[in-house]
Image: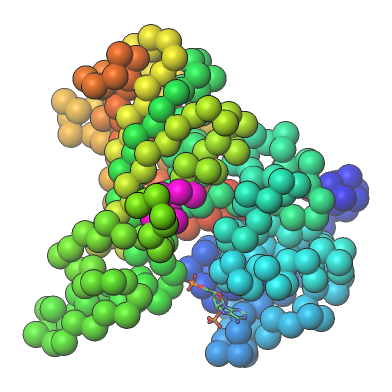
Amino acid sequence: MSDSLKKKKVYNIAVVGATGAVGMTFVRLLEARNFPVNSLKLLASERSVGKKIDFKGQTYSVELLNNESFKDIDIAFFSAGASISKVYAKIAVASGATVIDNSSAFRLVDDVPLVVPEVNPEEAFKHNGIIANPNCTTAILLVALKPLYDYTKIRRVVVASYQAASGAGAKAMDELINQTYSWANNGTINVSKFQYQLLFNVIPHIDVFTETGYTKEEMKMYDETKKILGDNDIKVSATCVRVPVLTAHSEAVVVDCENEITVEKAKELFSRAKGVKLYDEIMNNIYPMPLISAGKDDVYVGRIRKDLAFEHGIAFWVSGDQLRKGGALNAIQIAELISL
Ligand code: A2P
């Protein structure tokens, strides 16, 4: 399937969930990266049919997603949630498309590769029609873990995330903006996408709770890290927290390595790593923040220090654009890998 894609020069593309936060980022990045698009089909629900979206100077109308949507499509990017992927990804594959799915629907399925191009690019070529894009927080974490992992195996990762509203979609971003306007105008603060008011708050609850006491989001980090690194022994303990930030997730990370690794070595590894921007000059107050990493392709790494709890521990802070590396960018990089 990958070979047939490589023979083509231009591609018929579908974006499922094109009106969403990640979906809109797909359109902007396909344009910015000059991906060889022959035709573009923008798909969403009835609510958005006819909505206009610009791509390379042309205006496209959003179409209704249905069983016929994938005729002649080469690559279909899905970002409309797991239930839509479960129904339509197989229909797209049966129509001849290669699906790159941003939902959790297939990530842990055995014959579906789960790919971060900086980490396990070779896996992408083993697909049977569907390639999964990791959970956004996991993708950002893995880009940062990879250079350390290649130097010395990592045994344990303890991570706390600071996740932006964008991770819950476009309507969640609107909710945070509307709460801000309402607060400034003494209005009523409405809550619908999050469990509580997000403005002036942090919420340690993303996705549903599981029987382990961890949330599903936290268990995604545990399971997906193992699959992407191909290492069933690595252990991940995550606490995922929603913070009142619009775009870009940040993570406080501690890794416990098999062998000694110095701070200088870690910095050198980060400085050479693909997809990583070393951003670490504490004497000048230089460290990653959402205001720095939002809108950027690289994940920003800083606050690198010797961890005081583990013998071979390194602590650091990473911030990456959830809509880009945590979503659309990673998926487009996978498409570039298997097609160009
Ligand atoms: P729509 O805007 O028509 O609801 P986000 O993650 O930012 O909330 O975006 C979710 C995306 O998934 C949107 O583009 C949304 O389209 C799309 N979507 C949600 N439900 C459906 C559905 N039943 N069929 C097609 N697209 C859907």
Residue drawn 74% across and 55% down? 130
Residue closer to the observer: 29 or 260: 260
- Residue 44 falls within the magenta-colored stretch: no
Across the whole image, how many numbered discs are drawn on residues?
0
Residue closer to the observer: 220 or 322: 220
Residue 68 appears left or right of 82 = right
Rendered image quadrant of residue 168: bottom left
Residue drawn 47% across and 58% down? 323
**Quadrant of the image where one finds ligand 1:** bottom right
* Colour option used: rainbow
Residue 302 appears left or right of 108 = left
Q: Position of residue 187 (x, y in %)?
A: 14, 87
Rendered image quadrant of residue 200: bottom left
Give the extent of the magenta segment. Answer: 215-220
Compared with 267, 243 (above or below) is below
Q: Position of residue 48 (x, y in %)?
A: 57, 87
Residue 170 appears left or right of 312 = right
Residue 31 appears left or right of 129 = left
Q: Residue lying furthest left in this view?
A: 186
Figure quadrant of the C terminus? top right
Residue closer to the observer: 154 or 68: 154
Q: Position of residue 271 (x, y in %)?
A: 43, 24
Question: Of helix, strand and loop, which mostly describes the magenta segment?
Answer: helix
Residue drawn 26% across and 30% down? 303
Q: Is residue 338 visible?
A: no
Rendered image quadrant of residue 39: bottom right
Residue drawn 17% across and 63% down? 201
Q: Position of residue 239 (x, y in %)?
A: 32, 47
